[in-house]
Image (cartoon, rainbow, N blue to C red):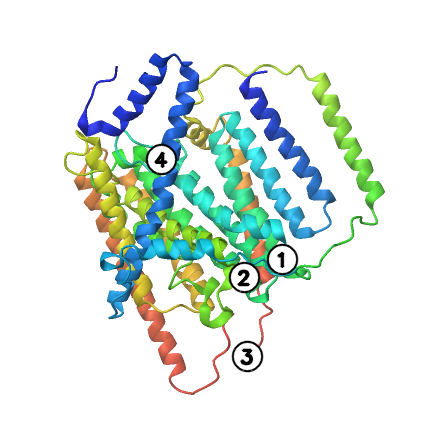
Amino acid sequence: MPEFSFGNIMVYAYDMIGWALVTYGLDSKLVVIIQKFLAAFLLANFALLTPIFTIWLERKIAARFQDRLGPNRVGPYGLFQSFADILKLLTKEIITPSGADKVVYFVGPILSVAPVLGIWVVIPFASTMIGANLNVGVLYSVAMGGIGTLAIMMGGWASNNKYATLGAFRAASQLVSYEVPLILALLIPPLLAGSMGMQDIVLAQGTWFIVYAPIAAAIFFVSSLAEIGRAPFDILEAESEIVAGYHVEYSGFLFAIWQLGEFLHAFTISALVSVLFLGGWRGPLADVYPIVGIVYLLAKTYFVYFISMWIRATVPRIRIDQMNNLNWKFLVPLALAALVMVALVDKLLPATLAGSGRAWAHFATNVVLMVIVFGMLRSESRRLQNLSLPAAAPVAPAH
Amino acid sequence: MSAQQIVFLVTAGVALISAALVVTVRNLIHAGLWLVITLAAVAAIYVQLEADFLAVVQVILYIGAIAILIIFSVMLTRRVMADTGPQRIPQWPLAAVVALLVAGGLAYLLVQVPWPAAPDVDVSDTVLALGEAFVDPNLFVIPFEVATIILLVALIGSISLALPERESD
């Protein structure tokens, strides 16, 4: 019989179920399969049900940013608004547009949620709690995130609607190109930790990696905002230009699945940022009582999520040329420079310098790089201003 | 038959059937989507071989980048929904001969080579071993660098192709 410990209660419950089933007389291999299925069921439902809360939270916070009240009719503080919306969406008819490619049309939204759920497999909730500690965890999360692009293209194309197809084109150009700085920035935590496993990365963060590599953290955060396709990077569903982009034809529950995918992806990206750069479950007492780690991880995740809501509620949508310029002329070169710099600095620093001293040395070089980059941006913008000052010559269309 | 064999047969079957569908369906977008399923099934086979790095790279590169670009270019270059391209190209007899030759050669190899069983090595941390093998002068550093140079040349070539003709202004 497993020993009870409150600090590790999830693992205790897991072991206890296994012990009980083995004592009942089941084959031990079958018991392991049952245990894993139960854990996967719980994990998937945790991830799937979180948006019910975060949608309310996001509407409430966005409302406050815009000097409104937000949902306030259903339940205390409008807490049950999401349930009312779910009921409404469930009872609405699912309309399939004429000429739609039926199978692809239905698979699209499902394929947008499933890979995001897959990312939760490698997120370490506590020192003893992780779905699967893959030694390629970081790459795995990128691979799962990349499938979302395919889902959006499928949904947009299968709708047989020109606005939906335009949204799919925009999605392809934006998501594929922002994957480049995303992956480059994502290389830095494994470089510092010496492993691509998520749990190893968290364990290596005696000092959080945001101190080691603030530039990489910022690039990762910005390009993952673009990967989710929310404001200010929501040109793939820009309401004022292409109605609602790739999901314009979707109604009822299929539309709900698209929304679920978007909110879940936003929450998942926040969890990834907190695992990779904010120390994951690390915090006081989290080593001794793993259950505290869950609280830390969720607190950090909600903090990052709040920042993304803040950006979403305050920054206007960027144009498509700005989107391309930001990526190819700023984020990609900066990510390459940061990657080379972190690798060099990590090798050049004496091996005796460990812990926070090493972290601050990395931080200092990051600040130097940032100052250089901002200097270059400043002189470039001065040059552009001087160019456009003398004559009101027609500006060549940027494309 | 063990559970492992059943899983392998199912994934291999999915890979083969969807590969056949890639070349037989009339709708080009559908062909692209079947290609995605083929690639995913191959990734699943890599997972069963405990080559997790290869499996993940397969998903990132082939599904996340190449298949999406193929579908994207099909969407851009053809009429969106109604397109059913011709099923054959004029050179199909030549292509059939080449394909038969390749298949025959592969089958011959399969019969002739005494396939040794893989040594029972620890495969728990393939990524580290792979990374070290890439920069080890005694192993793969030269092929690795040659491959990177080829990719770099392709990259520069595509940029120079995509650059607009410089207007004199």
Other-residue count near label 4 (Cα within 10 Å), few / some / many at <14 / 14–19 / ≥20: few
Pointer 2 chain: A
Q: Is circle 1 on the same chain as circle 4?
A: yes
Callouts 2 and 1 close, C-beta under 8 Å: yes
Residue beneath label 2, please? Answer: A249
* In this rendering, position of residue A56 left or right of residue B1: left
Disc on the earlier residue, 2 or 1: 1
Q: SS at mark 2?
A: loop
Dot 1 or dot 4, earlier in sequence: 4
Q: Which residue is mark 3?
A: B169
Q: Is residue A288 above or below residue A243?
A: above
Residue ID for mark 1 = A100
Q: Amino acid at mark 3?
A: Asp
* Chain to which the residue tagged by mark 4 belongs: A
Task: Please tell me which residue is depicted at 24% across the width and 54% down the height of the picture.
Answer: A367
Closest to the observer, A18 or A178: A18
